[in-house]
Amino acid sequence: MRPGDGASGHFLAIADWLTGQARPGELLTAYLRGEESDFVRISQGQVRQAGHVAERELTVALADGQRQACATVDLTGVPRSDRALLAEQLVQLRQTLPQIPEDPYLNAPDVVRSTSDVHPTVLPEPAEALAELLASARDLDLVGLWASGPVYAGFASSAGQRNWFERATFHVDWSLHGPDGAAVKAVCAGERWEPAVILGSMARARRHLELSARPRLTPRPGRYRAYLAPAALRELLAVLAHGGFGLKDRRTGQTPLLRMLEQGYALHPAVSLDEAHSRGLGPRFTRAGFVLPDTVPLVTAGRLGDALADARSAREYGVAVNASEETPRALTMTPGDLAMEAALPALGTGLYVGNLWYCNFSDRNDCRITGMTRFACFRVEGGEVQGPIAPMRFDDSLVGLLGERLLAITREQELLPDAGTYEGRSTASMRLPGALVDDLRLTL
């Protein structure tokens, strides 16, 4: 990182000046979150809205002992203006700090670890990529959102630590719609635009849309052999992620994996789940400056592994910080040996579940999740799709589905990013295979 290198140069210049304002006994830190994003909305196979967002948000924290005060400002990119704004904020923080009670769980790194993680940009211009996408769906009602460009983060402290992260990615979250109300959904994402991958995804979506136009079938409530596509598995693991892997939830008995924690239950030996910071789309350092490990093994060969510990829980329970928050941001499931193209023959007779929605816990202590089937869900007989199924409610234990009732895991994974943009482009993601399971319980 050198001053003058775009966003990193401006951040380092501001950080050097700001942290130089620290007084003896104070710890002054700065955390930058920024992006240079192109957004394009698509409807009926045409571009309807395009825009560009440039944002640099800096959070300044001033600590003295176990007291800390914080302020967040939007940087202009003009050094003089930004310094004036930050100088004013620093005065206010010093006035506020004595009024704040001591925080027993305030935690800061005790060693200085500076890092630089810059991924080269290999993305095309949005217009080029979208032209290929729209051409592949020229006779279809395509609806979606394109987002691309670099996302960056930086950390600096008056102790001398400097961290920088920058990565350019894209994601296109889209769906195809038929005249009879049928629809299928897909997402493509990554750091490299590969037209062949997009064409393959579009071809599968076309085929699913054609199958969805067949007469709808309504399965009876009961238990069914089922193939859960990666997108469906993500919806289940997204529910589990809220409280399933955090240290605080584990120590207070709030985890939905309580049976695994206290009663020795295990998932199938083929199931391994990791928080793979090194393979994620976000920075490997926290807002407080903790540098994260490459991987946190959450489940290993079916057995419960480490918990995610953020700075506050780490201080409370006397462990090392291994996460920026106690919800996974880069969850990865180890693949198996079932080829995705062989999923239908392996399923035989049952349900192909392409997507789920409205998922939530129905019995948290039993890790039981309920929700509805959604897009691209089909009745399969003899390895052949018979037709789409009507929306059905399921209610089942994830410990059971990924435990004794798991039959196979696909050898291919899909990168499934969080498409959220409410506070900036999300860098959370999952890399998941598909899963063949027995006795998925449909209730109505």
Image (tube, helix red, strand yellow):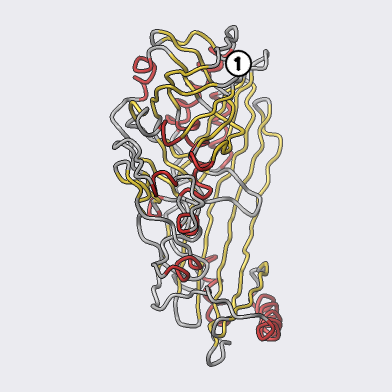
Is residue 406 shown left or right of residue 169? left
Q: Taking the image as drawn, is residue 210 in sight?
A: no
Q: Taking the image as drawn, is residue 16 in sight?
A: yes
Location of residue 384 (image quadrant) = top left
Query: Can you give x and y, in whole percent of width and height, for residue 243 in the image?
Result: 51, 50
Identify which residue is drawn at 48% across, 75% down: 108
Identify which residue is drawn at 42% across, 54% down: 120
Q: How many marks?
A: 1
- Residue 418 vs 343, above or below: the answer is below
- Residue 442 vs 83, above or below: the answer is above
Mark 1: few/some/many CA within 10 Å (<14, 14-19, 20+)? some
* Residue placed most toward the observer, 393 or 275: 393
Identify which residue is drawn at 67% across, 17% down: 181
Location of residue 2 (image quadrant) = bottom left
Query: Can you give x and y, in whole percent of width and height, for residue 119 in the image?
Result: 42, 55
Identify which residue is drawn at 41% across, 12% down: 349
Residue assigned mark 1 = 390
Q: Quadrant of the N terminus?
A: bottom left
* Residue placed most toward the observer, 91 or 127: 91
| Furthest-bottom residue in this view | 24
SS state under label 1? loop
- Residue 272 vs 21, above or below: the answer is above
Q: Quadrant of the C terminus?
A: top right
* Residue placed most toward the observer, 277 or 424: 277
Is residue 47 shown left or right of residue 196? right
Query: Can you give x and y, in whole percent of width and height, for residue 139 in the image?
Result: 61, 18
User: Which amino acid type corresponds to the residue marked 1 in the rendered image?
Assistant: Ala
